[in-house]
């Protein structure tokens, strides 16, 4: 549509509203509270996390088993004008973490994609690789030693602790540790007991020690070994799990280990969406609903 105006108006009168709108949006995204916020979204039997930084950068980590829950969760927290995402991270090639991301890439522009290395063996994995190829995002694989940072936010870092930089096999999950002003969250959703054993041979205890643990494998007994919990020493543990799932996750023994270690447990099947806020040495966890 073309818009015609009289030449009697100075140009700055027409430009000013757009400039003001851009400034308003920029100020809205640049929050002054200094908080990093993560939402462990309630996506059923899968994993999906939305991250928002104090400067307004956004990232989605995994996508859960379906499009509806992910899009609803992301749309709930992003402003209506904020259609694009700075980053999408796929930590594991499991279908219940990929499916929602495939649809997300079709709906929202993403600047960068970080993923683990794998060769597609399922239709969902193939759809993800096709969606990535059709996107305009810069794509990279990650391994131990890599750092994911955000422009002009030196206090916020996502450190990649796994898989190893050498000797890694395709399909190994990414383990990320989010660090911000003295607090940390270990994002271990894709790890199995086998991965934990290898990781513990690579890492010093200080590498893994974290305030919050996002538990691996939906709390099943195929992850979260006693040694791993003892090394992480979390004060809180968050389990992304679907209500009434067929594998009866989380396993009672995993819950017992976490409780015995002094970790307060939050579960998406019972608590719904779980928000984590980090601010200069302070950490607040707010569930959507109490148990």
Image: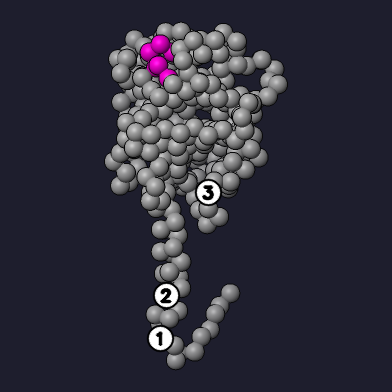
Q: Position of residue 113 (x, y in %)?
A: 44, 38
Q: Earlier in the sequence, mark 3 or mark 1?
A: 1
Instruction: Kindly give the residue lying farthest to the bottom in the view shown.
Output: 8
Q: Position of residue 192 (x, y in %)?
A: 49, 14
Residue at (40%, 36%) from the top-left corner? Answer: 278
Residue at (61%, 29%) from the top-left corner? Answer: 290
259 or 147: nearer the viewer? 259
Q: Is residue 28 visible?
A: yes
Q: Quadrant of the N terminus?
A: bottom right
Q: Which residues are magenta?
A: 229-234
Q: Earlier in the sequence, mark 3 or mark 2?
A: 2
Q: Secondary structure at mark 2?
A: helix
Give the Cα distance between marks 3 and 2: 26 Å
Q: Secondary structure at mark 3?
A: loop
Residue at (46%, 12%) from the top-left corner? Answer: 261
Residue underneath mark 1: 10
Q: Quadrant of the C terminus?
A: top right
Residue underneath mark 3: 78
Q: Residues within 10 Å of mark 1 (few under 14, many from 20)?
A: few
Q: Main secondary structure of the magenta part?
A: helix
Q: Which colour style is shown?
A: one colour
Q: Is residue 129 above or below residue 291?
A: below
Residue underneath mark 2: 16
Q: Find residue 32 and name its label.
A: none
């Amino acid at each position: 549509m073309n818009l015609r105006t009289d030449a009697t108006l100075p140009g700055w009168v027409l430009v000013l509203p757009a400039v003001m709108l851009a400034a308003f949006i920029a100020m809205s995204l640049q929050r002054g509270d200094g908080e990093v916020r993560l939402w462990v979204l309630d996506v059923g039997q899968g994993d999906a996390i939305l991250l928002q930084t104090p400067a307004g950068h956004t990232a989605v980590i995994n996508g859960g088993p379906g499009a509806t829950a992910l899009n609803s969760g992301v749309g709930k927290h992003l402003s209506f004008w904020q259609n694009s995402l700075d980053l999408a991270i796929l930590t594991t090639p499991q279908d219940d973490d990929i499916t929602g991301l495939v649809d997300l890439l079709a709906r929202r522009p993403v600047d960068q994609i970080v993923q683990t290395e794998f060769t597609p063996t399922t239709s969902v994995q193939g759809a993800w690789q096709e969606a990535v190829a059709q996107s305009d995002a810069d794509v990279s694989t990650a391994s131990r030693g890599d750092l994911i940072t955000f422009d002009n936010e030196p206090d916020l870092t996502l450190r990649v602790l796994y898989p190893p930089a050498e000797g890694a096999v395709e399909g190994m999950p990414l383990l990320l540790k989010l660090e911000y002003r003295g607090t940390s969250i270990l994002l271990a959703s894709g790890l199995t007991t086998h991965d934990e054993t290898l990781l513990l041979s690579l890492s010093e205890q200080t590498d893994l020690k974290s305030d919050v643990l996002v538990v691996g494998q939906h709390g099943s007994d195929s992850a979260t070994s006693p040694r791993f919990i003892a090394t992480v020493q979390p004060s809180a543990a968050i389990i992304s799990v679907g209500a009434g799932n067929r594998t009866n996750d989380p396993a009672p023994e995993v819950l017992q280990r976490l409780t015995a270690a002094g970790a307060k447990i939050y579960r998406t099947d019972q608590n719904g969406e779980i928000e984590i806020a980090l601010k200069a040495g302070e950490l607040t966890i707010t569930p959507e609903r109490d148990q």
